[in-house]
Amino acid sequence: MAAKKKSVAMHTNYLSACSFTNSDMQILTASGDGTCALWDVESGQLLQSFHGHGADVLCLDLAPSETGNTFVSGGCDKKAMVWDMRSGQCVQAFETHESDINSVR
């Protein structure tokens, strides 16, 4: 039996990063459209979108915690942004870099 495939759409540009959350039931994505998104794996439903970068988002990483409610993203706008996955809000931004942020950990 072939695996079920689902196609979901929200991003309007290339997908630059993708990561399972701590529960393995959700996926975080980052895109060249300047946004990040949280998806439900089973349904393919968009659970939350994250807007705040002024250019392509190149990378993301989850905070190392049991609750898994925060993640960081970095992009071509020279910003590293910390997000609350429940509210969709940026809780902290670091804007002192001199060039693109292409990796966060």
Image (spheres, grey):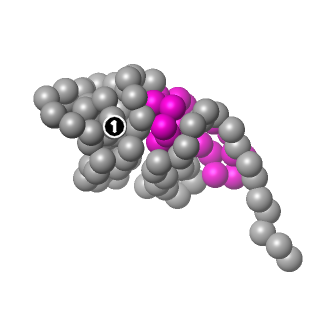
Residue 104: horizontal and vertical position, in percent? 27, 49
Q: Residue at x 77, y 59 (%)?
A: 5
The quadrant in which residue 74 appears is: top left
- Please say whether residue 42 is one of the residues in the magenta stretch: yes
Look at the picture and state if 58 lies above or below 51: below
The residue singled out by tag 1 in the image is 75
Residue 58 located left or right of residue 38: left
Residue extending furthest front? 99
Q: How many marks?
A: 1
The quarter of the picture where residue 81 lies is top left
- Expressed as whole percent of the image width and height from the top left, the position of residue 63 reads 30, 47
Helix, strand or loop: magenta stretch: strand
Most extreme residue toward the bottom is 1
The residue lying at 47 percent from left, 42 percent from top is 30
Residue range in magenta is 28-50
**Helix, strand or loop under label 1:** strand
Residue at 86 percent of width and 77 percent of height: 1
Q: Position of residue 42 (x, y in %)?
A: 69, 52
* Residue 59 rendering spot, x and y as whole percentages: 37, 46
